[in-house]
Amino acid sequence: MLRVIAERVGHLVLVLWVVATLTFLMFRLMPGDPTLNFLSPSFNDETRAALMRSFGLDRPLWEQYVIYMWQLARGDFGVSFLQNQPVSVLLWDALPNTAVLTVVSLVLAYAIGIVVGAFLAFRRGSAVEGVAIPVALATRAAPEFWLGMLVLAVFAFHLGWFPTGGAVSPGGTMGGVWERLGSADFWWHLCLPAVTLTLFLQGLPLLLMRATMLEVLNDEFITMARMKGLSRWSIVMRHAARNALLPVVTAFALGLGASIGGNVVIETVFAWPGIGRVLVGAVQASDYPLAQGAFIMIAFVLVVMNTVADLAYAWLDPRVSVGARR
Amino acid sequence: MWRPLFVLAGLMVPMVAQAQGDPIRPLTIITQPQAADPREYQAAQIVAEAWRKLGLTVNLRPLPGQQFTQVVWYERKRWDVTTWQMVGRPERGDPDELTYNLFVSANADNGYDFVGYINPAYDALAQAQRQELDLAKRKALVLEAQEMINQDQPYGFMVHPKNVVAFNKSVWDPKSFVAQAGIGIRSTWSWLNVAPLGAQKDVILNSVAPPTNLNPFNIPGAQGSWATEMVWDRLMRVGPDGLPTPWAAEKVERPDPLTVTVTLRKGMTWSDGKPVTIEDAVFSLEAPGYGDKSPMYKPFVRNISSVTATGPDTLTIKLKNPDAAFLISSLAKLNLAPKHIWAPIFEDLKTKPQTAESIQEDKPVGSGPFRLVKAALNQEIVLEANPTHWSKPKVSRWIMRIMPNVEAALGALKSGEINFLADYTGDPQILRDLAKANPNIVVSEALDIGFRFLAYNERRPPFDSKPFRQALSAMIDRQLLAEDAWGGAAEPSNSWVSPALEAWASKDIVKRVPASLDLVAAQKLLKDAGFVLVGGKLHYPTGVKETTAPFN
Amino acid sequence: MRFLRGEPFAVAGVAIYAVIVAAAVLADRVAPYNPTEILRANRRIARYLPISGDFWLGTTSSGMDIASQLIFGARTALQVGLTAAFAVVAIGTVLGLLAGYLGGWVDKAITRLADVVLGLPFLPTMLVLASLTRPGTGIVVFTVTALLWPNTARVIRSQVLSLRERAWVEAARVAGCSNARIMFVHILPQVLPLAALYGSVAIGWAILAEAAASFLGFGDPASMSWGVMLQDAYANQALSRGAWNWFVPPGVAILAMVLAGFMISRGSEKLLFPKLGDN
């Protein structure tokens, strides 16, 4: 097992490096002048050159690359063009909000998905299934912002039960992560985006749980248990569900990575001050250092979670492990 | 039977082709993406349809923000027509800035004259009004300039938009808002004067976009400026009537065209407790000129030749050239910054590539009526009233919420999450309907100083032809644009001087667009200039080849 | 079509596709108006008209017929969806085939490449690319292709791994068939149905991605797609004016098309989650 971990981690570092390099190239090779948006167009060329210099954009590409990699290795993402603050400060401020939104929604989605999925497997072929599955698929198939706007229209604009956006009430303080988590105001603001994201995420665990449950239910040991006279429901919950959880757990780790990046739309709809929103705002305003930093951070979370999922799978499933267990 | 005809037709084509020039290439109107500005996009759609009636092929091409600026401003030979806007800023209450910058030929290469309009007669007029200190004579010059542009039509003016805002009158005393000419009640004067009716003493307003960093040498975008104007004082402010009014200065006098004397208000303090001195004032007028460390504010001090303190609270400014608009364009623009904080910063910057704009103080020090207590990216800016200011606000905090979603801002106004809708880019009719259904909400509309227009690139034929530009402009149905694209929250425009500036606006200039809305007259303009319609397609005059590549 | 038997979901999915394809093919004849024509009432623009006999779904803020836009939108949807799906399937299948059959360094290289690509977040990558180049459907198709092929490749690879051990492959090899011939003539037909199922999911992703790009301001308003329609409705505050006739139909159309893909591919749930299917 240790060897597997070492191998995967080594692989992880390699992938991170390639992703970081790709990001660098993507942002440097684009057409246009990155200083445009924060310069009044009436400035002369000299002033523009001075600004290019101040951001190190006048150096040769390879030199910029070396500096970029060196800074990245130390967790330094440079300085935002427009906010004039270190990108890392802005990102670390936003990341917890995204993490909370993602984790809460994923946990909800998986809780619902697992229970409903198990139930549907149990009631295979029934009318309930005929309705539930298309509904579950449909919430996944709807455009996120459309779903989000409908949720906003109903629960915020018309009923007024929830705030229309943001993470805290006007003038409220948003302290550290723990302070946020202890604040009722924060949770109240979290409701609508989290519900929308949950709707969007629940289809996968539900279908996965149902499918693996069906497989497990056909296995021999279930028949054995049934012969022992255990009730159907307790068989399902005690034996089958436990075995069916394996792929679901792995999917959770993957989902965490993927959805941190996939939140851009929901964060924009609900004005949730997370990292996706930082990315969208920075891209729209051509704040390259900030956009680049946000992009890398999202990509890194994704790559790390991919590896975690790989490891979890290797650990949980004896079939893929390299003879370490069994 | 048909074969000889066919041959004949084959012979005919080159013969006909000799009677006119090449067909005009497909023309492209660059716009902002619909997502960024639905009204402008719709206006461009309507105009494109009208121009097609002249026999032109017209395409729309939306470009996202940065590419839009890049192409229009820095690739000046590349595009045909673009939508553009000049926004209303308080200091544009004097028409000098736009009159001069937009159309003088000196600005054609890389300045504000991005359409490449070149007319020596106009240059002389623009210069003359700038140096004319006699108000009546200057007005006449500005009117003459507007008439000249009306004939030349370097722009297809569309509309002067109205600022549409709304507030909650159960929170704020409606009578306590102050409307500023060309801006409306979303003005600094309102924030200084507005009176709360009940327990809610915080102004909570929305902004669509997040501002950049706030400091006295940075212009942090339109919305950010609302905050900086109140955190840092200025010697003068543009008053509600649009005229320069002494603010941190007690008195401002102009003994001769090249001299301005200022008497500083006594007893002001910085937010760190130190007094505001005449040295601070001198520094604030000089600092933007130090090296290239303050590119955004440098243009406003370019005409200053010297600033000298002449007493404990008096100073004298000497100008290089007479400048009629100096009080508005410079004294009401430059922020007062504490020398004890910023002199060391400028000293430090000398050896660094950064500029003063990029500095972010931990606790910004200003002398203004509000103090900055929080600026969180994509969330909010929080200002707190300065209780020791000589013009103490009646509210306790001023909170600007960043809300990218217009629908959400409307919802927030309804639910009371915000009590002033300051940044509304949506349909005004929806807001009016909302106010009708909700008696606590009051809508306020005010004509803006700015304007929206289509810029014709005079560097590219056929836009170098005056009759061609006139014909295009004639086809723009400005009333329709104001009513339908801008939902009634706009006035038709045919000048850069908004009717909001009553003293300077040219009355009824909209009605004097040559051949206005008359397809036949517009076609005649083209025909007289040699353009020919062949099979419904407009061609250049005889002998003119199409040598310009279409925009792509 | 045999796989449809006993699969009511798949039947429903195929039915939805049939409707969309019909709309796309017959758009010129079925749509009552030119979808980009600014309709007038007297001199004014016929904007925000409610549902009526003349305008089946009313008109937009620009005075364009919503029903016609919806019908023509099917064309863009199919273009974007099918191009992206075809590209994903083609690249994914070929690379999966090569990796699975040839093994060795080819396999390693392709697997590594797939890992890197899986490390690029989907929407953020599309946003960044769109902001750097010309926004529009091209970039959507490109991103979908460039980022989604690994899913297909992985499944095809594991499928090929088991197929190549079969006796008939061995027989072909002994008979002197070249590797290329075995891969593309013998094995390919066996894995194509699986790849096609992936394609139907990729159609969905492409449509959703296009809608998201439009919403964030990186779509191509000149194209007549459902995503652009939604953006148009949103930007013009269809919600605030209660213009459900404008805001709901394009969303439902997107939903239906994506759902159809899911339903067809539901023959195996693992398809929705490829990482778990291969080992």
Image (cartoon, rainbow, N blue to C red):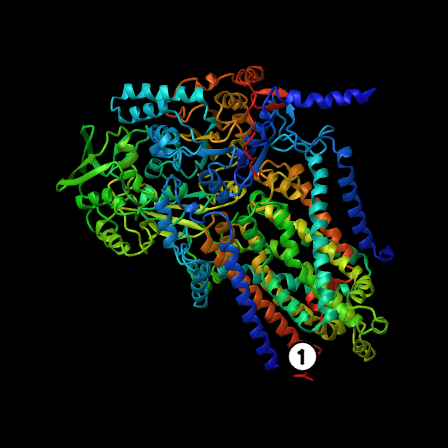
Left or right of B260 in this view: C262: right
CA neighbours of label 1 inside 10 A, class few (<14), some (14 to 19), many (20+): some
Left or right of B523 in this view: C57: right
Q: Position of residue A160 (x, y in %)?
A: 55, 45
Q: Nearer the viewer, residue B87 or B413?
A: B87
- Quarter of the image with the C terminus of chain A is bottom right
Quadrant location of residue B7? Answer: top right
According to the picture, the residue beneath numbered tag 1 turns out to be A321
Check disc 1 and report its element: helix, strand or loop.
Answer: loop
Q: Nearer the viewer, residue B151 or B246?
A: B151
Quadrant location of residue A14? Answer: bottom right
Figure disc tally:
1
Q: Position of residue A17 (x, y in %)?
A: 53, 67
Looking at the image, residue A239 lies above or below residue B89: below
Q: Nearer the viewer, residue C236 or B291?
A: B291
Q: Position of residue A304 (x, y in %)?
A: 56, 68
Q: Position of residue B550 (x, y in %)?
A: 57, 35
Q: Nearer the viewer, residue C169 or C66?
A: C169
**Could you tell me which residue is drawn at 62 percent across and 21 percent down?**
B18
Label 1 resides on the chain identified as A
Quadrant location of residue B235? Answer: top left
Tell me if residue C215 can be seen. yes
Looking at the image, residue A287 lies above or below residue C100: above
- Quarter of the image with the N terminus of chain A is bottom right
Left or right of B185 in this view: C164: right
